[in-house]
Amino acid sequence: MPENGAQRGRPLASPGLVWAPGRVPMSSRFSDIYYSRDGGLEEARHVFLGGCGLPGTWRNDESFTVCELGFGTGLNFLATWEAWRRARFKNARLHYIAVEGFPLLQSELSEALLEWPQLRAAVRGLMRVYPQPQRGFHRVFPKIRGDDDSSGVTLTLLFGNAHEMLSQLEARIDAWFLDGFSPDKNPDMWSAEVFTQLARLSHTLNGGTRLATYSAANSVREGLATAGFESVKTPGFGHKREMIRAHFRGGAKTEPLLQPWFARPPSAHGTRGHAAIIGAGIAGTSTALALNRRGWRTTLIDRREVIAAETSGNPMGILVPRLTAAANAHDGRFYAAAWRFVLDMLEDISESSSTMLRDRCGALQLATDDTETARQKSIMDAAMLPEPLLFQVNSKEVSDIAGCALPYGGLYFPQGGWLRPRAVCAALAQKSNTLLGVDAVSLTHSGGLWQVADGAGRVQTQADVVILANGLGSGAVPHTAWLPLVARRGQISMTPPTEMSASLRAVLSFGPYITPPYHGAHCVGATFDAADATQTFGDITANDADDVRNIAAINAVLPNMLEEQRTVAPHHRAAIRCTSPDHLPIAGPVPDQGAYLRDFAEMRHGHPWAKYPEAAYQAGLYVLTALGSRGLTAAPMAGEILAAHITGEPWPLERDLMTALHPGRFLMRDLKRREV
Ligand code: SAM
């Protein structure tokens, strides 16, 4: 539920931005200013960058992770990004994580940053990706035109209370910027619980994680000391006599919050390798983009001769998020985060694409009965997505948006619509090598490399990591044969517009869906039927009976919308989708099944988790599958998740969501139920 003081469209409370004399931004909620009256940018450089020894401690081929407490106007971020760009590193990324409990709105941020004309290009880059004030993690990629993406910056904004957000973070922080409002005005930001999280996320390598804060309060030094930081007072900025610099020495053992069966595998941290990705559909190509962005080489391998020839090969695919009513349910939160992520990604690739990738015509989820009306009310109450990403609309508004008279209210996603999935996959795969028409059937690991061989035993490629992103095929090698993948047959039908449907200009979905007409056809879908998991693509043929069902499903709710039993070229298409028993995607490292069942055997008796060893994985083997019928929405975020697993980078989402997608969850579920 929204915090106290939150308004509709603003799920987190406002800081109450006002301008103090000297045009310094100030929060009326905390009666404190965002940065020094003596110069915010100089303060950022002196206190935070200087206090952590930056840019001096950055190295050309080492990624670096900063975490700031109190993103505010983003000025410290912009100062850090500017210094990183100046360093012109070739083989490193800057990960900038920032917690913010009372985010400024885009309009407020833009107003505040007008103060810094010298940072104009970076401000523009930030403004393009700055998220709506929605609780949770937001991973974005601010960019300045012409910059090399692979040495760029990844910004992860954690919108919510500092302690709650830090407790959900999995990352190895190299430098902390503590910039909450002053401890006497805002003790929450400087609590013992927050300091415990700082210790959990810090390390003792290379002199230990650095920390800087403008505050010189004794209570802060004491809190830091208890958490294992050694601190000194040094000259402050402007009229402030002193500030604190510190580094992490280690101290009282902090308990990991990550359960051992989800422990992070040894990663290729800092190295840029070669990944072989099996499956060139939306899952594989999304992962390729995420790894290419990090300077990895990728090879997409597919048994078909073209990209996105199987489940991702429909001529049109709808883009609508799958929200659930329960505010804390993993699937609803995951799909809300995935929705924000895919919209940014599409924006990005559309800019550089010469072909049409999508129609951002908007999507309406109709409330066609009382159950759905109640479900939509819960989604709105839970503030799953803020305006302008989601609006609740009445039947008059639905009719105006849709372009034809409809008797239902519903949810409106203005950025939704439909995609051309093949064109999107091709755009995502732009920087990837491809091995098409190659059936990768065997994987062997030797000398630290994976060999991927075809049916004739020919090694087609060697790679540091292999990613199984080929739907049901992801469970077809012995390493993953235990994954409980479920097959579902889906058929779409192309049908000509009628007098009633011709004016439709938004996607309508209410279980079944219909797109606006494009080149003389609506895309209508989709069936969702039990299927035989051993079928290959060649075995699956579309049939007329399913066209009748698809069209009838629309007409049952919107009478006479479509002409019965009429299709037009390319008529129809069927494919097998892969889903999982809990309907969430599977994304992460592949557990060593034997080791899991042995190491965690005591879980059959529910023994507490602190006593177990860390999970053992198939070195360098990862999986991304079970995207079900929401692949277009879920895949980009899932690809980003995989890239974080592979490179050892900060996780892009809350720990509970990352572990909800972890492949090992099924083994643990079976152990707990004593089914293995
Ligand atoms: N670094 C910022 C900048 O560059 O503009 C200024 C940060 S300002 C001094 C402190 C920030 O901490 C505010 O944006 C405030 O909303 C945030 N904050 C205060 N209490 C918080 C809490 N308990 N959890 C998360 N954020 C909090």
Image: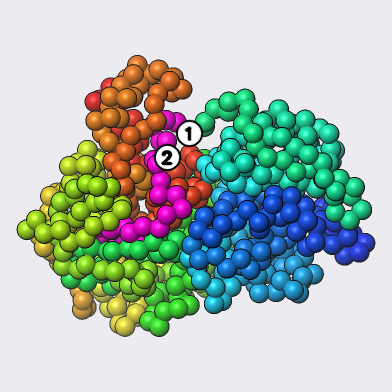
Q: Badge 2 is on which residue?
A: 264
Within the image, what quadrant is residue 576 found in? bottom left
Residue 247 visible within the image? yes
Over which residues does the magenta segment extend?
259-288
Q: Is mark 2 within 8 Å of ligand 1?
A: no
Residues at circles 1 and 2 in contact by the CB criterion of under 8 Å: yes
Task: Choose between 354 and 449: the one closer to the eye.
Answer: 449
Q: Badge 1 is on which residue?
A: 258
Q: In this view, does 27 lie above or below 307?
A: above
Tag 1: residue type? Answer: Leu
Residue 168 percent across, percent down from the top left: 55, 40
Q: What residue is at 34 percent from the left and 79 percent from the top? A: 518
Q: In this view, does 465 lie above or below 547?
A: above
User: Label 1 crowding class (10 Å Cα cut-off): few <14, some 14-19, many 20+?
Assistant: some
Residue 660 percent across, percent down from the top left: 41, 40
> Which SS class for mark 2?
loop
Q: What residue is at 16 percent from the left and 67 percent from the top? A: 437
Q: Is 265 colored magenta in this rendering?
A: yes
Within the image, what quadrant is residue 632 found in? bottom left
Residue 164 visible within the image? no
Residue 676 percent across, percent down from the top left: 24, 25
